[in-house]
C-alpha cells in the first residue's frame, strides 16, 4: 500500500480523536472525508484481517462439495503476505537528497523589487535575441529556449557572485542554446555574443543595485567600481555596437 507523506500521522490523529476529518481546500475532492475506517486500515498490522473485519468477511470460506473441487482442492495460504504482515524491503536511497544552498550571503541577496526589475530586463533581452535570430530558427524554436527561465533564475540567485564574463560563462554553460546567437553578432569577442549581451545586462543591473542600496552594502575594488559604473557600461554598448554593425 503506497500512501502520501504524513498520511500515517493523520490517520493516527483521527483515531485518537475518534472522528472523521474533513478535507480542506478547493478542487474536486473538496468536502471529501478521510474515513475513520481507512485510518484503521492504514494502521492495521494485518491489512487482510482488517478488511475481513470491515466487510464482515468470513475468515475461512466453507469448502465446496462439487466433484471438481473435491478433486482439485484449493490451496491453503499458510501465512499472510499482505503489506502489513510482510513489509516491503525498500533499499537505502542511493543518492540522498541534499537541500540546495545559495552560496550568496543573505545580505547580498537581491530584494524582491530588484529581482523583478532584473527579470524584466532579462526577459526583454531574450525577446531582442529572439527577434534578431534567423526566421528559419524562430519558426521551429520557441522564444524561451533562447534564454531559459532556469538560467534567468540562476543569474538572479547568484547575481552578487558574477564579477566577470568568465563567471557568467560558467553559470550559463549548457543552459543557453548555441542557436540562440544572432548571425550579426557572431564576431563579438570570441564567438560569445550571448554571454556578452547577458554581461551587459548584469553590469547594468549591478549599477542600478548599487544606486538603490548604496555602495556600502558591496565592497568593491577600484577596478570593480569602474566595471560597474554606468560610464563603463555605455562603453561596452558602444564597442559591441561597432563590432556587430
Image: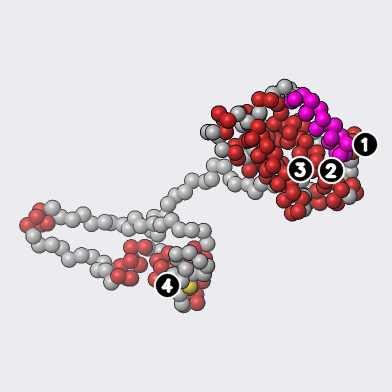
Q: Nearer the viewer, residue 14 or 73?
A: 14
Tell me which numbered mark, 4 or 3, is placed earlier along the sequence: 4
Q: Quadrant of the C terminus?
A: top right
Task: In the rendered view, tell whether residue 88 sits above or below residue 65.
Answer: above
Tell me which numbered mark, 1 or 4, is placed earlier along the sequence: 4
Pointer 4 with pointer 2, Cβ within 8 A: no
Q: Which mark is residue 169?
A: none
Pointer 4 with pointer 3, Cβ within 8 A: no
Q: Quadrant of residue 221?
A: top right
Nearest to viewer (mark 2 / mark 3)? 2
Pointer 2: what residue? 207
Farthest residue, direction bottom: 18
- The residue under the point 70% across, 46% down is 119
Q: Position of residue 16 (x, y in %)?
A: 50, 75
- The residue under the point 76% across, 53% down is 113
Q: Nearer the viewer, residue 58 or 225?
A: 225
Query: What span is colored magenta in the figure?
Result: 228-245
Q: Which mark is residue 222?
A: 1
Secondary structure at numbered mark 4:
helix
What is the C-alpha distance between the residues marked 4 and 3?
52 Å
What is the C-alpha distance between the residues marked 2 and 1?
14 Å
Pointer 4: what residue? 36
What is the C-alpha distance between the residues marked 1 and 4?
70 Å
Amino acid at each position: 500500500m503506497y500512501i502520501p507523506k504524513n498520511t500515517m500521522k493523520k490517520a493516527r490523529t483521527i483515531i485518537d480523536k475518534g472522528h472523521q476529518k474533513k478535507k480542506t481546500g478547493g478542487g474536486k475532492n473538496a468536502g471529501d472525508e478521510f474515513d475513520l475506517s481507512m485510518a484503521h486500515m492504514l494502521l492495521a498490522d494485518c491489512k487482510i484481517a482488517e478488511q475481513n473485519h470491515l466487510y464482515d468477511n468470513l475468515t475461512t470460506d466453507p469448502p465446496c462439495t462439487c466433484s471438481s473441487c473435491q478433486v482439485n482442492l484449493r490451496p491453503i495460504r499458510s501465512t499472510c503476505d499482505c503489506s502489513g504482515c510482510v513489509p516491503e524491503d525498500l533499499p537505502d536511497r542511493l543518492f540522498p537528497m541534499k537541500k540546495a544552498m545559495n552560496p550568496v550571503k543573505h545580505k547580498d541577496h537581491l530584494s524582491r523589487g530588484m529581482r523583478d526589475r532584473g527579470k524584466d530586463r532579462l526577459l526583454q533581452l531574450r525577446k531582442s535575441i529572439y527577434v534578431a535570430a534567423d526566421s528559419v530558427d524562430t519558426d521551429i524554436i520557441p522564444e524561451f529556449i533562447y534564454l531559459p527561465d532556469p538560467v534567468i533564475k540562476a543569474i538572479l540567485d547568484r547575481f552578487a557572485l558574477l564579477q566577470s564574463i568568465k563567471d557568467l560563462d560558467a553559470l550559463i554553460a549548457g543552459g543557453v542554446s548555441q542557436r540562440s546567437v544572432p548571425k550579426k553578432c557572431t564576431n563579438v569577442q570570441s564567438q560569445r555574443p550571448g554571454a556578452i549581451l547577458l554581461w551587459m545586462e548584469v553590469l547594468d543591473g549591478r549599477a542600478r543595485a548599487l544606486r538603490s542600496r548604496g555602495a556600502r552594502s558591496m565592497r568593491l575594488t577600484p577596478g570593480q567600481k569602474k566595471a560597474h559604473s554606468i560610464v563603463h557600461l555605455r562603453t561596452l554598448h558602444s564597442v559591441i555596437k561597432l563590432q556587430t554593425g
